[in-house]
Amino acid sequence: MHDLCRLTVDAGRLDEAEHLANEYEHGIRCARGPNHPDNVIALANRGLIQRLRGNLATARPFYQKAADEARRILGLEHPATRAAEREYTVLLESLDTPKAAAP
């Protein structure tokens, strides 16, 4: 499900990708529980899709929760935790960047 979601993102089919990302997150939680590392990936996917749509404020809670869950599940030093924190930081910087004034 994750691979199919990423392929639809790469193809620019964001409506389909969003549906798949939601299903993936739900499936991971049901099948593997709340402490499985794939929960981090599922949350990051949902944030990515919102970011690609230009919905940075909507993407923020997904990226924040992905970073929080990575710290909780994987620990502070895990590479996936650092990647999730980096993605969240980049998003926050994008939110703080003022939009260029319209001509």
Image (cartoon, grey):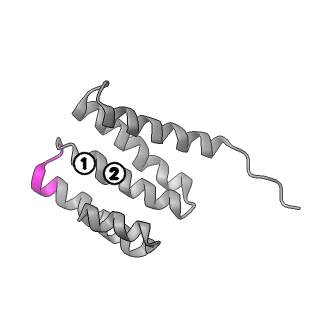
Q: Is disc 2 surrounded by few (<14), some (14 to 19) or many (20+) residues within 10 Å?
A: many
Q: Residue at x 18, y 45 (%)?
A: 34
Asked if residue 40 is positioned above or below residue 3 in the image, the reply reads above
Report the side of 60 relative to 24 (left or right): right
Find residue 43 and name its label: 2
Please state the horizontal and vertical placement of residue 4, each as a whole percent of the image.
Answer: 28, 68
Whole-percent x, y for residue 100 in the image: 79, 52
Q: Find residue 39 and name its label.
A: 1
**Which span of residues is magenta-colored?**
29-34
- Label 1–label 2 contact, CB within 8 A: yes
The three-letter code of the residue at mark 2 reads Leu
Q: Is residue 32 magenta?
A: yes
In the image: residue 85, left or right of residue 53: left
Label 1 crowd (10 A; few <14 / some 14-19 / many >=20): many
Position of residue 40 relative to residue 12, above or below, is above
Residue type at mark 1? Answer: Asn
Q: Is residue 40 left or right of residue 89?
A: left
> Looking at the image, which residue is at 18% across and 61% down?
27
Whether 69 is among the magenta residues is no
Quadrant assignment for the N terminus: bottom left
Determine the CA span between mark 1 and mark 2. 6 Å
- Image spot of residue 2 (x, y percent): 26, 61
Q: Residue visible at 55% across and 53% down?
A: 56
* Residue 8 screen position, x and y as percent: 37, 71
Disc 2, SS: helix
Q: Could you tell me what secondary structure mostly forms the magenta stretch?
A: helix
Farthest right residue?
Answer: 103
- Front one among 90 and 66: 90
Q: Quadrant of residue 67?
A: top left
